[in-house]
Every structure is written in C-alpha cells, then in structure tokens.
Amino acid sequence: MLFILRALALNEVRLRMRRTSTMVALLAVVAVSWAMIADPASGNALLVFNKARVLYTSSALALGSATLGALLFGLGGFYLVRGRMSEDLRSGIGGVIGATPVGSALFLAGRWLGACAYLGALVAAFMLTMLVLHALRGDGPLEPLVYLQTYVLLMAPMVLFAASCAILFDSWAPLMGKGGDVLFFVLWVAQLVLMTQSGSGEVQALMVFDFSGLAVAVAAVHGFVTGADFSIGSSPFDAALAPVSLPPLLWSARMMGLRAACAVLALAPLLPAWWLFHRYSPDRVKPGRARLRRTPLALLNAALRPLAVLANPLLALAARVPGLAGQVLADLALTFVIAPSALLAFVLCAGAAVFAPVNALPAVLMAAVAFWGILVGDISTRDYAAATEDLSGTVSGGVALRYLRQYAASVLLGLMFMGPVALRWTFTQPLRVLALVVGVASLSALASLFGRCGRTARLFLSLFLFGFYVALNATGAPRIDAVGFNGAANLHSVALYALVGALALAGGYLYNASRLAR
C-alpha cells in the first residue's frame, strides 16, 4: 500500500511540476516575496511597533515573511492545486481511475500528498528568496534554522488546510466549479476576520483554528515587546525612534503545541472528502460537469439567459467590423453571451457610477473591479476549457494574434465596467484616472499571461483575490492600489504597473508566437 501511495504522490508532483503554470507561479512567488519586504531606506518597514521599525534580523524577517506568505499560500495554494479531478473528467481518464482497484481513501491520500509536496516546493522557493533578501537587506547574521522553524510553524497548517480543502471541493460535484472557488475565498476571509477580532496578543485556545498563523504571530511578538501599535506589512516608521530587535526564539511550548494541533485539524476536510468522493461515477458527476459548473453563478447566468439577447447588436457589429477590431468585439460579445450576469453587473455599475455621490465612487469602483477580475480570468482560458483551442488558433494570425485579441477584449471589458467612474474623475482626479487605466491594462496582461501559460483561470484568480483583499486593508500603500480605488496611487506606482503590464504582455505574446513557430 505504501508503494502505491508513493507512486500516486510522485506522479501528482511530476504532473504539476512539468506544467508551464508552475514556472509562472514560481516567478510570481519570487516577485511577490520581494515586493512584500519594504526597503527601510524608503521609509517603510516590514514590521513596525509603536512607530519604530523592527530590525531585519532572521527572526523578524522570518516572522514577517512567513505571516504574509501564509496568507498568500493559503489562498493561492488552494486555487493552484485544485481542479485535477475536473481535468480527469475532461480528458476521459476519470473513468479509468474509477475502475481501478485502488481504494478511494488511498487515491485521495495520494492526491493530497502530491498537492502538499507541490505547495511545499513553492514554500521552499519562497523561503530561499527570503534568505537571499536577508543577505542584501538583513540586519545581523543569517540563521537558516530560525527561518525553517518559523516557516514550519506558521505556514505548514495553512498549506495542509488549503490542500485538504482542495481535495474536498474536488471530491464533491457541487463544489467542483467556480462556486467552490468563491466559497473557499469566503471561508478564508472569515477565518482571518475571526482571528484578527479575537486576537488580543495572548495565546488563546481559539488559535487552534488560526490556519493563517496571523493571530499566533501577533501573540509571539507581543510576548517580547510591550505596546498595542503593531503592524505587519509595508508600513511607515519614525526614523527618529530607536529600532526594535526581536530575539531569535519567539515560540513558546504552548504556541508550538497549538500550531501542531492546528496542523492536525487542517486534515479534517479529508474525512468528508472520502465520504463524498464521486469516484467519477456517471450518476454522481458527468464529464460535462467540469465545464457546465452548475454553481450559484452558473444558476444566475441560466436565470438571466434572456438578457443574452442584448449582446446580439454587438455580435452584428463585430461581423461588420473587419480585422482585429471585429474579433475583439466578438470576444467581448461572447463574454456577455456566456455570462449574462456580466450584462446586469455592467448596467448596475454604470448606473451607480452615474448617479452615486462623489464620495461613494471608490466603493462603486471596488465592486466593478471585483466582478471584472473574477470574470476576466476566463477569457484567455475558455478556448482550452471548451476544447476549441486548436480550432480558434487557425484564425488569421494564429495563436499569437488570438492572445492579443483576448487581451484587448479584457481591457475593453474593464473600461466598460470602470469607465463611467473614470469619466467622473477626469477633471478632478486625473492621477486616479491614469492609475485606473494603467491598472486595467496591467491586470489584463497578467490575466492573459497566466491563463494562456497555465490554461487555468485559477492562478490569476488566486493572486487577484489576494491582492484585492490586501488592497481593501492596506488603503495607504501606493503599490497595492492597482486601479486607484484607495486614492493612494502615485506616479511611481503607476509607472511600476505600466512596466509590469508591458513585460507581461510581451512575455505572453512571445510565448504564443513561439508555439506558432513550432
């Protein structure tokens, strides 16, 4: 049995590691990890206590980066490792797997171990990046064992929980689609809110549910530094105050016991997964289920299907407009036909942007960005999901032009959702308008790049939802304010997003052009 379990887990890891999306995810992890750690020379620091910065010792960098990394991998890890059973259904291999004598518990255990090993490899790459950053910006000696202990205690429970939830959501047909994606995001935010509201700097038994490690990290710091003003992330500090130094060992025996119990509790979703596992049975889940995705959003789109007729004039216009412009309009119209809820959301966002008072426009923009971000991830992947990738690639210009067409459709869709807000800000807040336009273009480029390379919308969706959540909380950070709804964006952050968008667009085009050449 151990031999079979080992073979299943290794096969899972090999399948994931050979994908282009893994390289994209690794590069994204490296980029995000460097962006999270502020250079003290800029006036901001990763850890700030009572307006004094905490020195970048091994314990401080390990604690701060592991806390932020647990938030990233807890959300992003779920979207990265789930979906394998949907792929089994689409490829037809699911029926073969279901007919094998391997038991459901053993099969799910192999999938879970492979998912944990895959996420563990990404976490290891994240930690190695922090070690390099410590060599460049750190204060004091580099202590790898301090990093290893902190990363295991803070990140392991969340990684295990994300992998367990991914197995559960893939094992039950109603949660296999986008409804499961949204439900996990809600659960992830709920446990963060629960921990942050209950955390008082004391080690409480409730922290056994702190999968993110946020509350226990705060408690660890409060055990050595007195005061209430504490922040983790890029925060300004008073250079006139003496820096604070954390000791190498932050973890008490009680804390380590709670983290161990939390890691065990993170395995709990595997029990209902084994009970609910469909085992690819045709009477419980059908091959088309992975594409149909009868989630609440799918049910809403089905109920709003009559609204799809409103996209007919756009389709007719696309047929009359020649070249790339007509193809972009056709892709946009197809988005509204597939998701009529997008038409309703567009009407509501446009109406709110026109009639809402000026001080409510940021909230309107937040809602528009959230819906657009969830919607736009599917534009560059729907050809693959519908098994029409080769067919659509035969259109004039091939896959490279298709990439540009889908990117342009994403930008146009974003401007439709957010344009009315931009128009009202044109003369009063031009910098916000510039941030909005550049942010839409940059995020569209990232959505197209991640979607085309990984052939899944989940990589972009996970990073987008994580960034959106951070932006809702870090309202004063310019680099987080991608589309300007916080009003913190400046020319430097706008230029940074423009550079990221240009590199993503060029990289995606070259990747698709190389596939055309082959």
Image (spheres, rainbow, N blue to C red):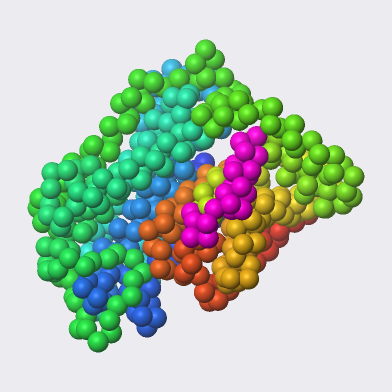
Using the rendered image of the protein, determine whether residue 87 is visible from the camera's viewpoint: yes
In the image, farthest residue toward the left: 253
In the image, farthest residue toward the bottom: 240
Which region is colored magenta?
A: 340-363
Can you say whether 260 is above or below 324 in the image? above
In the picture, residue 432 is in which quadrant? bottom right
Can you say whether 322 is above or below 5 in the image? below
User: Residue 154, position in %: x, y?
Assistant: 26, 53
Q: Main secondary structure of the magenta part?
A: helix
Using the rendered image of the protein, determine whether residue 21 is visible from the camera's viewpoint: no
Task: Judge left or right: residue 30 versus residue 340.
Answer: left
User: Residue 177, position in %: x, y?
Assistant: 52, 32
Can you say whether 266 is above or below 296 in the image? below
Say which residue appears at 39% left-offset and 40% top-offset.
Answer: 186
Can you say whether 126 is above or below 381 in the image? below
Give the quadrant of the N terminus.
top left
In the picture, residue 2 is in which quadrant? top left
In the picture, residue 374 is in which quadrant? top right
> 182 or 345: which is nearer to us?
345
Say which residue appears at 65% left-offset and 39% top-offset.
Answer: 343
Task: Judge left or right: residue 203 versus residue 99.
Answer: left
User: Residue 162, position in %: x, y?
Assistant: 37, 41
Q: Is residue 356 magenta?
A: yes
> 309 or 360: which is nearer to us?
360
Say which residue appears at 35% left-offset and 36% top-offset.
Answer: 164
Say which residue appears at 41% left-offset and 22% top-offset.
Answer: 277
Q: Is residue 31 magenta?
A: no
> 261 or 184: which is nearer to us?
184
